[in-house]
Each structure stands twice: as structure tokens, then as C-alpha cells.
């Protein structure tokens, strides 16, 4: 077996260095995106289009894609966790002491906090305020097709039931469930799933999430609106939208669109601070999840918006698990402290027409971007 | 109101950013070379760190080139401020 020669303390120090490099590059990337959004560039484009376009193209090559600075920053973060992990393993093995493992775990935690803080203090949002970024993301018209629906929601569904159903949706799916309230009025609960961390062919992609976070004229929001029409939801109906991650962002866009009377929106792990629809909002945020920080706003509760944050393992290596609906959010929703929170309780009371209801047969749709550019523009 | 000076300022900012990227990644790469991490996992990680440094250097070059383009635009436009 090959001998292992490792300076454990040196590798731990390198892990810190790599984490710091990753955080700094992430901050540099977000600050440089602000340059892309600078109105002087738009002005220059009208006067010297070719040369300015070359400059913009170079900046984008420097920032975007797996070989851009954002990808490089993520690469350093991964290496930092790997180095900290091996240092922890070796140190614990050498000393036989769990306390050392905890010490190295703290390094991982520090890296997570560092990155989270970096996102919150970015000049503008890494995603939400990315300025010119969204201009370059192709947008199809947004198309939907029926897929077999699940069984109706249980009577008087809880938030855990609703998010459990969101977790059952496949990539690109949305479910529209009619609910009959005690007052005899039919309302609708709309469940929207979140991003898939891969370049899948549906709308639940990182690029579409960037587009959704920037405005409301995006394919995902249009496709959800089309799904509502296809489900036969009459204009002006009262709606409650429930989304995870990108689904929460899109829910806010649909709420702002105005065709329906969206009275309630619940989001989990979504960067939505910059969106202001008229609905009552419950924003649920796991403190170990970096995604809600992507809008670079430390959001506060106000009369219209309840922000429920809960503590979690803030190690960088847990960031993905903290964003996951199954491991990062559903356990908290079933915890008694969630239901006991005064803000959450008040919100759930206000949502009683949807929750204290008898759900009907839901409709489920698969959303796709559709052809781009649209046939008429080719 | 924008002027050629506004673009020169953006160009300087991009060039400074490029230098910062180079400094950060070279420091990490130097640190990686100095540390003893001689096992398969370590060699793999250090090789990856080297690859990232190369990619980051290319990104920094893109930013410097962008800065040159903007300076050229500024030179073409001259110094007359323009109301948007």
C-alpha cells in the first residue's frame, strides 16, 4: 500500500486558504456582473456597437459557464471542503480524538458562513440583481402538457402535506388542486417544484431560475400561468401558491401577474426579497441553505410578509442537503416549534380557507420552455 | 450623463479585478505547492487546484481584454460628455 505523507496542519491551513479564495472569487464575480449592468455600457453600445459588444462578450466569458469565475469559485469551495475533510479524518485517526474532528468541522462551518456572508453582502444580487445576465438567457414561450395526476390531497391539508406533494413532483411539473372551503367557495392550491441541479431539458434549470429571479417575463412563470388556464382555473379565482426554491420565485412572479387573485404564497429556500406581489407571503429559510441569500438581501418580517428562519448545520459540505426539500425543509415543517411560531400561526390562520378545506381531483402538468426563438422569429 | 471617462473608469475597474483574480489564485496555488499532501486524494486535489488557477488566469485575461476594448471605445468617443 502506498505510504501517505500528509502535513495535516498544512492541509487544514490550505483548506482555509482555498475557502477564502473561493469566497473572494465569488464576490469578484458578483461585483463584475454589476459592471455588465452599468448603463454606460448600454450607452456605449449605441455609439460603438462592435467594440462594446466585444467587451461585453469578454466579460461574459470571464464570468459565466463552468470555466467562468463563478464556476471557478465553486471549484475552490469544493476543494476546501475536501481538504478540510481529509485533514479532519487524518487528525482524528492520529489522535483518536473526536474533539479534533469537531475542530475541523468548525473549519467547514466557517467556510459555509463565509460564503453565506459573502452572498448577503454582494454589491448586487449574484442572481437576482445580475443586470444584463438575463438578457442572454433564451426564453421559449413556455408550453405545458398533461401528465397523470396524483391522488387528491388529504382533507384539511397541512403545509407538510403540501410540501410533501411538491417533493413528489417530477422535474418540470406543477400541480393544480381545487379545494372546497367551508364557505362553499372553490379556491386553488398550486404546487410548484424547484430547480434541478443539472442541465435537464425542462424549465427547472439554473439558467431559468436566474431568469425567473430577474423579472416575471420568463418561460417558467408563463408556463405556470398556461397550466392554470389549461386546468380551467377561472380568471379572478383565489389562489394559494406553494413553491420550493425556483418554484417559490416563480410563485411570486405568478402572484404579481394579476390574472388571478393570489392571496397567499409560501416559499421554501427561495431568494424572493426583491419581489413584492400583493399576496401574504410566508418565506421559510434554512440558515444553512445558501440559496435564499442569492438576492443579497437580509429579509425581515413585515405586516405582509412572514420570514421564518431556522437554525441548521451551517457546514459548507451540508449546503446542498440544507437546500433539499426532503432533508433541509420537510423535517422542520413537522417540528412542533414551526407550528408554535406566532408569525407562522398567524399566517396559517389567514390561510384557513385553503387549509381547512376539502381538496378535489388535482391536475398535473409538465412544463417545458418550448422552441426558441419562436417559429415566427426564425 | 456619460462620457469617455466613465468607460475608462469601468476599464480600470475591470483591469484591477483581473489583477485581483490573478493574485488570489496564484496565492492559493503557491500555498498548494508548499504543503505536503502526498497521497492520491491530495495529488488529485492539488492537480485540480492547478487546473482552476489556469482557468482563472484565462478569465483574468478575458477581463483585461474587455478593459482594452472599453478603452478603445472611450478613445473613439473622445471626451465630449453626452446626456443619455
Image (cartoon, helix red, strand yellow):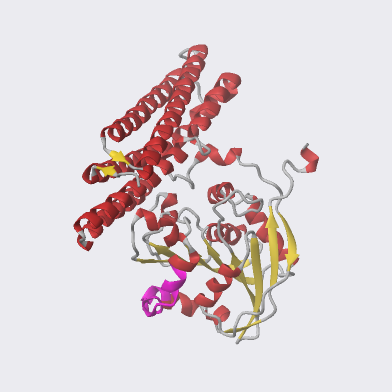
**Residue A225 image-quadrant placement:** bottom right
> Any magenta on residue A243?
no
Q: Nearer the viewer, residue A291 or A184?
A: A291
Q: Is residue A196 left or right of residue B47?
A: right
Residue shown at 67%/55% (left/top)?
A222
Residue shown at 62%/67% (left/top)?
A169
- Whether B12 is drawn above or below A314: the answer is above
Q: Is residue A71 left or right of residue A314?
A: right
Q: Nearer the viewer, residue A17 or A41?
A: A17
> Any magenta on residue A342?
yes
**Residue A354 image-quadrant placement:** bottom right
Q: Nearer the viewer, residue B20 or A197?
A: A197
* Predominant SS along the magenta part: helix
Pinpoint residue A332: horizontal percent, then vertical percent. 41, 72
Pinpoint residue A62: horizontal percent, then vertical percent. 48, 31
- Whether A102 is drawn above or below A184: the answer is above
Pinpoint residue A176: horizontal percent, then vertical percent. 66, 70
Question: What stretch of residues is rendered in magenta?
Answer: A329-344
Residue shown at 52%/32% (left/top)?
A60
Residue shown at 36%/41% (left/top)?
A22
Q: Nearer the viewer, residue A299 or A192?
A: A192
Q: Is residue A278 left or right of residue A334?
A: right
Q: How many marks?
A: 0
- Report if residue A308 is visible in the image: yes
Query: Farthest front residue?
Result: A1
Amino acid at each position: 500500500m502506498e505510504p501517505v505523507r500528509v502535513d495535516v496542519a498544512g492541509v487544514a491551513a490550505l483548506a482555509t486558504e482555498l475557502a477564502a479564495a473561493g469566497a473572494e472569487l465569488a464576490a469578484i464575480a458578483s461585483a463584475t456582473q454589476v459592471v455588465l449592468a452599468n448603463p454606460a455600457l448600454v450607452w456605449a453600445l449605441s455609439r460603438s456597437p462592435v467594440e462594446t459588444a466585444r467587451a461585453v462578450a469578454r466579460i461574459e466569458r470571464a464570468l459565466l459557464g463552468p470555466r467562468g469565475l463563478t464556476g471557478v469559485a465553486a471549484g475552490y469551495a469544493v476543494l476546501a471542503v475536501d481538504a478540510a475533510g481529509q485533514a479532519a479524518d487524518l487528525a482524528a485517526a492520529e489522535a483518536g480524538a473526536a474533539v479534533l474532528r469537531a475542530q475541523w468541522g468548525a473549519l467547514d462551518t466557517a467556510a459555509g458562513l463565509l460564503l453565506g456572508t459573502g452572498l448577503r453582502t454582494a454589491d448586487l444580487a449574484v442572481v437576482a440583481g445580475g443586470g444584463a445576465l438575463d438578457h442572454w438567457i433564451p426564453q421559449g414561450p413556455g408550453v405545458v402538457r398533461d401528465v397523470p395526476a396524483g391522488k387528491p390531497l388529504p382533507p384539511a391539508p397541512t403545509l407538510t402535506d403540501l410540501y410533501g406533494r411538491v417533493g413528489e413532483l417530477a422535474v418540470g411539473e406543477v400541480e393544480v388542486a381545487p379545494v372546497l372551503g367551508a364557505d362553499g367557495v372553490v379556491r386553488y392550491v398550486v404546487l410548484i417544484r424547484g430547480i434541478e441541479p443539472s442541465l435537464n431539458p425542462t424549465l427547472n434549470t439554473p439558467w431559468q431560475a436566474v431568469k425567473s429571479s430577474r423579472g416575471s417575463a420568463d418561460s417558467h412563470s408563463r408556463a405556470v400561468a398556461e397550466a392554470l388556464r389549461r386546468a380551467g382555473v377561472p380568471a379572478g379565482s383565489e389562489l394559494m401558491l406553494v413553491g420550493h426554491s425556483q418554484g417559490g420565485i416563480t410563485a411570486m412572479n405568478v402572484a404579481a401577474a394579476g390574472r388571478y387573485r393570489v392571496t397567499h404564497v409560501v416559499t421554501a429556500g427561495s431568494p424572493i426579497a426583491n419581489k413584492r406581489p400583493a399576496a401574504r407571503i410566508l418565506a421559510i429559510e434554512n440558515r444553512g441553505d445558501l440559496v435564499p441569500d442569492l438576492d443579497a438581501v437580509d429579509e425581515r418580517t413585515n405586516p405582509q410578509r412572514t420570514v421564518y428562519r431556522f437554525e441548521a448545520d451551517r457546514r459548507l459540505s451540508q449546503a446542498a442537503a440544507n437546500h433539499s426539500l426532503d432533508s433541509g425543509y420537510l423535517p422542520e415543517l413537522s417540528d412542533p416549534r414551526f407550528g408554535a411560531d406566532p408569525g407562522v400561526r398567524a399566517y396559517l390562520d389567514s390561510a384557513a380557507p385553503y387549509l381547512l378545506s376539502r381538496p378535489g381531483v388535482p391536475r398535473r402538468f409538465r412544463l417545458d420552455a418550448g422552441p426558441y426563438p419562436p417559429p415566427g422569429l426564425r | 450623463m456619460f462620457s469617455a471617462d466613465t468607460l475608462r473608469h469601468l476599464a480600470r475597474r475591470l483591469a484591477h479585478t483581473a489583477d485581483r483574480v490573478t493574485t488570489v489564485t496564484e496565492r492559493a496555488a503557491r500555498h498548494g505547492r508548499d504543503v505536503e499532501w502526498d497521497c492520491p486524494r491530495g495529488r488529485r486535489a492539488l492537480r485540480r487546484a492547478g487546473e482552476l488557477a489556469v482557468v482563472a488566469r484565462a478569465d483574468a485575461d478575458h477581463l483585461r481584454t474587455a478593459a482594452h476594448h472599453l478603452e478603445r471605445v472611450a478613445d473613439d468617443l473622445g471626451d465630449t460628455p453626452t446626456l443619455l
